[in-house]
Image (spheres, grey):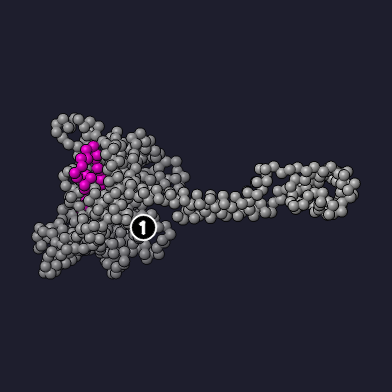
Amino acid sequence: MKQTTKTILIFIGSLVLVGAVLSFVNLDSKEKTDISTLARQIDQGSITSIVVRGTEMEATRSDGTKVTVSKESTESFSELMKNYGVDAEKLRDTQVTIEEQSGFAYWASVIIPTIIPFALVLVLMWFFFRQIQGQNNKAMMFGQSGARETKGNEKDKVTFKDVAGVKEAKEELSEVVEFLKNADKFTALGAKIPKGVLLMGTPGTGKTLLARAVAGEADVPFFHISGSEFVEMFVGVGASRVRDLFAKAKKSAPCIVFIDEIDAVGRQRGSGLGGSHDEREQTLNQILVEMDGFEPNSGVILMAATNRPDVLDPALLRPGRFDRRVVLDPPDLNDREQILKIHAKGKPLSKDVTLRQLAERTPGFSGADLMNLMNEAAILSARKSLKEIPMQLLLDSIEKVMLGPERKSHVMNEDERKVTAYHEAGHALVAHLLPHADPVQKVSIISRGRAAGYTLKMPLEDRMSRTSEEYKEDIAVAMGGYAAEKFFFNDITTGATSDMKSATKIARSMVTQWGMSDKLGPRTYGEQEDMIFLGREIHENRDYSDDKAVVIDQEIDALISDGLKLAKKIITENKDAMDRICAKLLETETLERQQFVDAVGLPPANPKNKIS
């Protein structure tokens, strides 16, 4: 409606502007005069001929110039000249021609001035009603699905070759692709095509990319839509769009329908706001019916992606609907190297770049993180007008992705720099001298993000599980900065806030979730409940007594206290090493792994952490 009003105003304004311009422009280039002047010139004999056309007279002077004169339509030319006292002899010497006005010109002069305003009104009304009709058409299409169909011959087609890692997931989906291409091979043995495939994994692990790869591998129509596109403020629209989506899919069967972020409509019913009849639940009910209802749904495979499978409705997850659940784990070392190779395509890398080393420095990175890493390095190289991407900028990009950009404008005074140096040296030294801690890769007192400094620790290998001793040492490493500030300055700063949060979180999980407390035994305490309509954990169901709560607090305090004591012991016994690390940090601001080991002057407690 706003667009229509804007267009009408522009149209009217244009007409007014054209009229204003024309009002100042004299379209008639001929000279005009009055009747008395014409009569005087006839008497003087300076007029050679006169042509009378209706109410206009055109006179030609003896010098060849022409002049026009207007008269009344009810008075003839001869009567007019007689009334002005023109000499009859002079008038006879002047050639006078009377031209009758044509019928078209007459009617045009009468009708056009009347028709133009009406025509303008009709044009505006036509334009206005056309806009209204367009809005009505949109309203009629409101309940139709907005799913986009991807063609198999697109230039940006993605296949399984473009997805590194997730080998098991690709094997599962390869069977789905083969079902679509050669269904007879499976139906001959009585196998039925799966109705639904649910892709589950943490954000950035490649769920949507893998779905695009299925579209690239399968030579069938592929419809994709987001879960949030079903839900509108009007009741029944979501269910209508689901019906329209599956109607389109059934016409194109065999085909694949992909719903991204299905948790937007697939959350557990009856747990949110709006009772059991709100718009989201009606949409979910329609999806359930379309997947496994009264009507057969052969040839249509529904794929969906979510990073919150725990909030999905049980009816959505039962066999017959989502028959397969494909879990996408974070990439391991080899997978990260393969992902980096894919994202390195089209980027000129220096000869010193080793993707294996980058993969080793990025444990816990998802595929999206690795793509962002390579992109950030390319941007940094372009900003420095480099022709190739060097290894150092790739390493810097790791820290930028993890911690944020360097805050070069944040200049610390000497006291702050010294406190930050001892704080980070405390973390690094404790990690270096504990047998189960990850090796220190880098120590810096350059501000990044919200951190005044940072200590970068990276495991040498991927691990699926960890022991209680390793977590206890993690607490000690986290408290290393606090212990260093307390020992060297007899005071603490706000820089230890995040360290205390990290230590408390580890200790609480050890006590309440992982059964790593001798006093409390092998059980969990407190069940976290999800408020489905918010999609996040905001409430803990306390399933233990007040006496147990006291013991939980005591055990958490004991773990943190023991970690702090261990950190203090290491720092106190290695004061000289702390001073060497801090002196080097204050001089260079950043220590890489070899520089740090040289500054410590002591071998790592874990032989695996030695630099080969």
Residue at horizontal 27 percent and vertical 61 percent from the top: 499
Report whether 188 appears left or right of 154: left
Residue at horizontal 28 percent and vertical 47 percent from the top: 242
**x%, y% of residue 96?**
82, 43
Q: The N terminus is located in which quarter?
A: bottom left
- Of residue 64 and residue 413, the one placed in the foreground of this image is 64
Q: Quadrant of residue 494?
A: bottom left
Residue 167: tell me if it is visible: no
Residue 58: tell me if it is visible: yes
- Of residue 160 and residue 28, the one placed in the foreground of this image is 28
Q: For mark 1, give the secondary structure.
A: loop
Residue denoted by label 1: 449
- Of residue 50 and residue 590, the one placed in the foreground of this image is 50
Q: Quadrant of residue 92?
A: top right
Q: Residues in magenta? A: 288-312
Residue 326 position (above or below residue 40): above
**x%, y% of residue 99?**
75, 42
How many dots with numbers?
1
Residue 109 position (above or below residue 299): below
Count residues near mark 1 (Cα–Cα under 10 Å), then give few for <14, some for 14-19, many for 20+: some
Residue at horizontal 74 percent and vertical 51 percent from the top: 73
Going by the numbered disc 1, the residue's amino acid type is Gly
Residue at horizontal 56 percent and vertical 49 percent from the top: 119
303 in the magenta segment: yes
**x%, y% of residue 409?**
43, 59
- Of residue 577 and residue 102, the one placed in the foreground of this image is 102
Residue 481 position (above or below residue 66): below
Report whether 397 appears left or right of 15: left
